[in-house]
């Protein structure tokens, strides 16, 4: 399953040996190409949830973390938004908060499927993690996912005391589509005078609908979120406008012309990822705009390696680096 590229003019470097071995061992039915049928997304979401549940069964249950699901006002009158709130049990607040937005290409995933990751954040950082269960495309295209996530962030900020959260230490984070939504919400908070975030962590973020970079053309057959799936995901999210000039930067943050005034930012991406070059460019533009920026390019990793290859040295180093970056901001 670990083919390299179908574009001989742009060869990828070798995969990390441990990651390559994992790719070869992952059952065919675990791959998004097998899981994701854009013509039957409800069934695809059920299959994906089953796979994530099976993988979560291997995670250690943390008795130091409590999880509560609450409903808060959505972006429009009469709408409700579900939030998963994960808190330390034996710890005195107010705590820092990580507002964690799940991935899934804008079309799959849920807040529940992020419980294991959220618990790790709580355990490592003694923080509260809030995960919004935003509505998915194509049933709910842009701007609904951004609106949902922004409404949830506003509620967290306005009700920080109720959550035992320090409103001055709220960070936003997410992987893949969640990273793109986090970037869009952060831009909107800056533009609209919303919650003053102390940090954003963009993990291999989905931020550019144009699919014109070298890496977007290289990563075509590795098996986990390649070019064709990315185009389909953006089409589901943006409809016929995808790739056109008429795309707001809240939808595709790579299109933002002004990146100044954003909070300190951590970005990481792997070499074997269609999002490699758009993430790299975004990091460079943030730094050039005066934003405190930390960027990591993980050699030999594939999209989602930190989920599908948790025991590899690369994944362990990656998570240690992420936690250390957040720890310096939230707890030091």
Image (cartoon, rainbow, N blue to C red):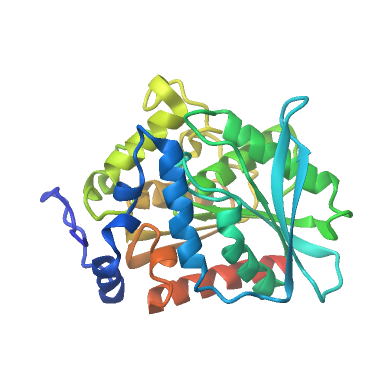
Relative vertical location of residue 179 with respect to residue 237 in this rendering, above or below: below
Relative vertical location of residue 174 with respect to residue 213 in this rendering, above or below: below
User: In this image, 104 relative to 1: left or right?
Assistant: right
Residue nearer the viewer, 194 or 315: 315
Q: Which residue lies furthest to the left in this view?
A: 8
Residue 85 location in percent, x, y?
73, 56
Give residue 272's quadrant in the image.
bottom left
Give residue 326's quadrant in the image.
bottom right
The residue drawn where x is 59% and y is 70% is: 323
User: In this image, 213 relative to 288: left or right?
Assistant: left
The residue drawn where x is 60% and y is 51% is: 111
Residue nearer the viewer, 187 or 166: 166
User: In this image, 263 relative to 136: left or right?
Assistant: right
Relative vertical location of residue 321 with respect to residue 141 in this rendering, above or below: below
Looking at the rendering, in which quadrant would you find the N terminus? bottom left
The residue drawn where x is 71% and y is 66% is: 330
Looking at the rendering, in which quadrant would you find the C terminus? bottom right
The residue drawn where x is 46% and y is 64% is: 54
Q: How many labels does the image show?
A: 0
Residue 172 location in percent, x, y?
64, 52
Relative vertical location of residue 39 with respect to residue 110 in this rendering, above or below: above
User: In this image, 77 relative to 277: left or right?
Assistant: right
Residue nearer the viewer, 312 or 55: 55
Residue 38 visible in the snapshot: yes
Residue 314 location in percent, x, y?
39, 74
Residue 129 location in percent, x, y?
69, 59
């Amino acid at each position: 399953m670990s083919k390299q590229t179908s574009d001989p003019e742009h060869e990828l470097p070798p995969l990390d040996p441990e990651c390559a071995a994992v790719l070869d061992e992952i059952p065919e039915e675990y791959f998004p190409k097998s899981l994701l049928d854009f013509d039957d997304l409800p069934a695809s979401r059920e299959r994906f949830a089953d796979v994530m549940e099976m993988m979560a069964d291997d995670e250690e249950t943390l008795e130091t973390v409590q999880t509560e699901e609450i409903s808060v006002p959505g972006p429009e009158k009469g709408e409700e938004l579900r939030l998963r709130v994960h808190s330390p049990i034996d710890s005195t607040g107010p705590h820092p908060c990580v507002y964690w937005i799940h991935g899934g290409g804008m079309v799959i995933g849920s807040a529940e499927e992020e419980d294991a990751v959220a618990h790790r954040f709580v355990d490592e950082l003694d923080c509260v993690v809030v995960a919004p269960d935003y509505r998915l495309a194509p049933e709910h295209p842009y701007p609904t996912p951004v609106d949902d996530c922004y409404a949830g962030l506003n509620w967290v900020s306005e009700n920080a005391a109720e959550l035992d959260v320090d409103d001055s230490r709220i960070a936003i984070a997410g992987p893949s589509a969640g990273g793109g939504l986090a970037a869009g919400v952060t831009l909107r908070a800056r533009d609209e005078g919303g919650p003053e975030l102390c940090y954003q962590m963009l993990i291999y973020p989905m931020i550019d609908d144009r699919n014109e970079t070298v890496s977007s053309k290289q990563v075509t057959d590795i098996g986990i979120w390649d070019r064709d799936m990315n185009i389909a995901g953006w089409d589901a999210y943006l409809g016929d406008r995808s790739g056109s000039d008429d795309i707001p930067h809240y939808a595709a943050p790579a299109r933002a012309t002004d990146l100044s005034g954003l909070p300190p930012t951590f970005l990481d991406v792997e070499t074997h990822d269609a999002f490699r070059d758009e993430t790299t460019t975004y990091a460079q533009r943030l730094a050039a705009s005066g934003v405190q920026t930390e960027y990591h390019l993980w050699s030999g990793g594939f999209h989602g390696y930190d989920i599908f290859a948790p025991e590899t040295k690369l994944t362990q180093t990656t998570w240690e680096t992420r936690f250390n970056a957040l720890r310096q901001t939230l707890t030091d």
